Image (spheres, helix red, strand yellow):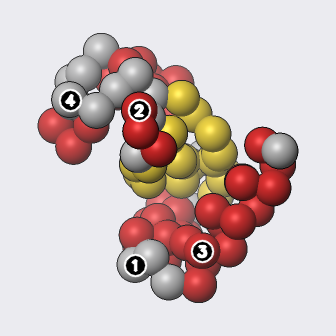
Amino acid sequence: MHYVYVLSGQGGAWYIGCTADLRTRLLLHQKRRVLATKGKGPWELVYYEAYRYQTEAFQRERSLKQFGGAYRQLRKRLAEERI
């Protein structure tokens, strides 16, 4: 399986990523071994999606990172769930 995941950090920061090993990747984020998130933790996993094929996961990650409709829809959904 391949995963697209969303982390929430201090000050409302978000990180969107893609990996084949979600648990290991989360540990790397927490241990500050991922350059993109190194100084912005601690991080909390707030959402993930599982895909059978890597190409599908990469496409979804790209659509979320473009901050268009898919991104706004996910932000809204997660905000509603946290209420």
User: Which circle marks residue 56 in the picture?
Assistant: none
**Which amino acid lies under the numbered mark 4 shown in the image of this protein?**
Gly
User: Which of the two residues, 21 or 6, is positioned nearer the viewer here?
Assistant: 6
Task: State how far apart marks 4 and 1 are (Cα).
Answer: 23 Å
Judged from the image, the secondary structure of the residue bearing numbered disc 2 is helix
Residue at point 83%, 44% (across, down): 83
Question: Nearer the viewer's eye, disc 1 or disc 2?
Answer: 2
Horizontal side of 48 relative to 13 (left or right) equals right
Question: Nearer the viewer's eye, disc 4 or disc 1?
Answer: 4
User: Which circle marks residue 39 in the picture?
Assistant: 4
Mark closest to the chain's N terminus, 4 or 2 = 2
Residue of label 2:
10
Q: Residue 40's spot in the image, x, y percent?
A: 28, 32
Residue at point 45%, 28% (across, down): 43
Task: State how far apart marks 2 and 3 are (Cα).
Answer: 20 Å
Task: State how far apart marks 4 and 3 are (Cα).
Answer: 25 Å
**Which amino acid lies under the numbered mark 3 shown in the image of this protein?**
Arg
